[in-house]
């Protein structure tokens, strides 16, 4: 995966707006508007930092996935990979749009149920599921549990009551290494996830003999932020070699557009690749499940900060009131983000956009063009809908930001900002 770099020249205003949620515009005075809401008014009302979500854009994205897959393969469903944005309001919204939900762990499962998700639509993942988490899934009536190891089989056979039945899939590690960051590649040999082809065959044989576990099919997921469709086709071929099943969960992994240079395949190109491969090698009557995460939510989110300090003198440092406490993707994966002064969008000179945390790695964007940045300015960073909320933390005692849904000029907080009292809440005398 090539290291993303800053543009050689300031991009046009139009190019910059293209990284924000569809429909993002400028008000008559040049102020950024998300979901019809002025950035300045959002900052005044909800404070900064804040994670803004264009609700209409998220709903449209969900429908584009679900309708696109159904048109190509009717026996199919889309399960949101909720680790990308495990927020109760997001679960509720996507359930309203008819999506299933993929959860990884008891916490995500609990949030999904709180969001009104039908337990039968849940796909339960995890390479190290505890007995308590599996019991929670079984007792909730989770539709599918993805077996990641022989230990999962042992635990489930102890948990599922005699006379009952739990549907499962076997997660397969196909030996495919896509071009992405090592931290988010999951399908290669040596991955901690799933079972290699020979072990997968053993698990399949064992599950077919189980009295309480019903083998519905197989699952494959080769990684995240993948900007080429070819590895997905190879993954379909790999699981097809294991035999005919009722269900093939083909995972997710389609990349999102973070930078001007990024050219991820469209949803339609991605679906065409998967379904073309499926028609060639999978049973026509099988159900296909896909699990988009990053590509579902990344472009629908915008982080809004306030500049606290500007230091000139090569380079120009623009420090904001957030950072790696609410966006860990830069430090973890070297992911690049673009940015703009919310009241002066486009143009400007390269700046080091940095956070407030006591780490030199707390850089939100290196060499990002910002026009005449000043203390007190609002700084908007697009494409933060995926993993920024998931990975938010309290480093340096930072308070995790609110999540604000914006739609048709109306805004509402769906997650409140943390308080200092929250930081003390779990302490014992």
Image (cartoon, grey):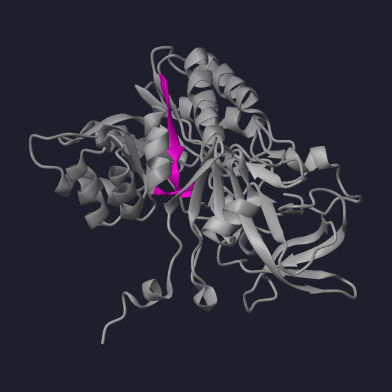
Rendered-image quadrant of the C terminus:
bottom left
Total tally of numbered discs in the picture: 0
What residue is at 42 percent from the left and 27 percent from the top? 248
Left or right: residue 36 compared with residue 165: right
What residue is at 43 percent from the left and 58 percent from the top? 416
Up the image or down, 3 lies above or below 60; here it is: below
Looking at the image, which residue sits at the far left?
Answer: 163
Up the image or down, 276 lies above or below 334; here it is: above
Whether 77 is among the magenta residues is yes
Left or right: residue 153 compared with residue 275: left
Q: Along the line of sight, which residue is nearer the eye, 70 or 393?
A: 393
Find residue 422 and report its image quarter: bottom left
Q: Along the line of sight, which residue is nearer the eye, 218 or 200?
A: 218
State whether residue 178 appears in this view.
no
Looking at the image, which residue sits at the far front?
Answer: 28
Q: Along the line of sight, which residue is nearer the eye, 53 or 153?
A: 53
Can you give x and y, in whole percent of width and height, for residue 105 in the image?
A: 35, 52
Left or right: residue 367 compared with residue 384: right
Can you give x and y, in whole percent of width and height, for residue 269 in the image?
A: 65, 24
Whether 346 is among the magenta residues is no
State whether residue 74 appears in this view.
yes
Q: Along the line of sight, which residue is nearer the eye, 225 or 37?
A: 37
What residue is at 24 percent from the left and 45 percent from the top? 137
Find residue 274 and report its image quarter: top right
Q: Which residues are magenta?
A: 76-87
Can you give x and y, in whole percent of width and height, for residue 355 in the image?
A: 66, 69
Can you give x and y, in whole percent of width and height, for residue 409 in the image?
A: 56, 38
Up the image or down, 275 lies above or below 325; here it is: above
């Amino acid at each position: 995966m090539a290291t993303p770099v800053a543009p050689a020249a300031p991009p046009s205003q139009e190019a910059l707006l293209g990284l924000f949620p569809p429909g993002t515009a400028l008000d008559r005075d040049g102020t950024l508007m998300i979901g019809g809401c002025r950035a300045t008014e959002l900052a005044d009302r909800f404070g900064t930092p804040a994670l803004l979500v264009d609700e209409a854009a998220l709903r449209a994205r969900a429908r584009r996935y679900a309708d696109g897959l159904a048109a190509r393969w009717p026996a199919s469903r889309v399960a949101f990979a909720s680790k990308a944005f495990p927020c109760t309001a997001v679960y509720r919204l996507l359930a309203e749009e008819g999506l299933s939900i993929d959860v990884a762990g008891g916490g995500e499962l609990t949030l999904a149920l709180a969001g009104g998700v039908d337990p039968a639509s849940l796909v339960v993942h995890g390479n190290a599921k505890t007995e308590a988490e599996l019991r929670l899934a079984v007792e909730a009536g989770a539709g599918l549990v993805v077996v990641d190891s022989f230990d999962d089989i042992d635990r489930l056979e102890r948990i599922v009551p005699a006379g009952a039945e739990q549907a499962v899939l076997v997660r397969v590690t196909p030996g495919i290494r896509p071009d992405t960051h090592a931290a988010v590649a999951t399908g290669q040999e040596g991955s901690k996830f799933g079972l290699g082809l020979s072990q997968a065959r053993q698990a399949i044989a064992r599950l077919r003999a189980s009295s309480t576990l019903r083998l519905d099919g197989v699952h494959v997921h080769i990684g995240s932020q993948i900007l080429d469709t070819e590895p997905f086709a190879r993954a379909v071929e790999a699981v097809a070699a294991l035999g005919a099943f009722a269900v093939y969960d083909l995972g997710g992994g389609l990349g999102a557009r973070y930078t001007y240079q990024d050219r991820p395949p469209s949803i339609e190109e991605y679906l065409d690749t998967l379904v073309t491969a499926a028609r060639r090698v999978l049973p026509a009557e099988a159900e296909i499940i896909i699990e988009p995460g990053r590509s579902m939510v990344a472009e629908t989110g915008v982080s809004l900060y306030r500049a606290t300090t500007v230091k000139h003198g090569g380079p120009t440092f623009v420090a904001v009131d957030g950072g790696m406490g609410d966006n860990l993707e830069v430090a973890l994966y070297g992911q690049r983000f673009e940015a703009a002064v919310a009241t002066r969008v486009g143009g400007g000179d390269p700046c080091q956009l940095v956070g407030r945390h006591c780490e030199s790695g707390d850089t939100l964007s290196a060499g990002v063009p910002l026009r005449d940045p000043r203390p007190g300015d609002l700084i908007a960073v697009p494409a933060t809908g995926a993993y920024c909320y998931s990975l938010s933390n309290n480093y340096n005692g930072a308070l995790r930001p609110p999540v604000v849904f914006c739609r048709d000029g109306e805004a509402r907080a769906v997650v409140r900002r943390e308080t200092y009292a929250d930081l003390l809440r779990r302490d014992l005398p």
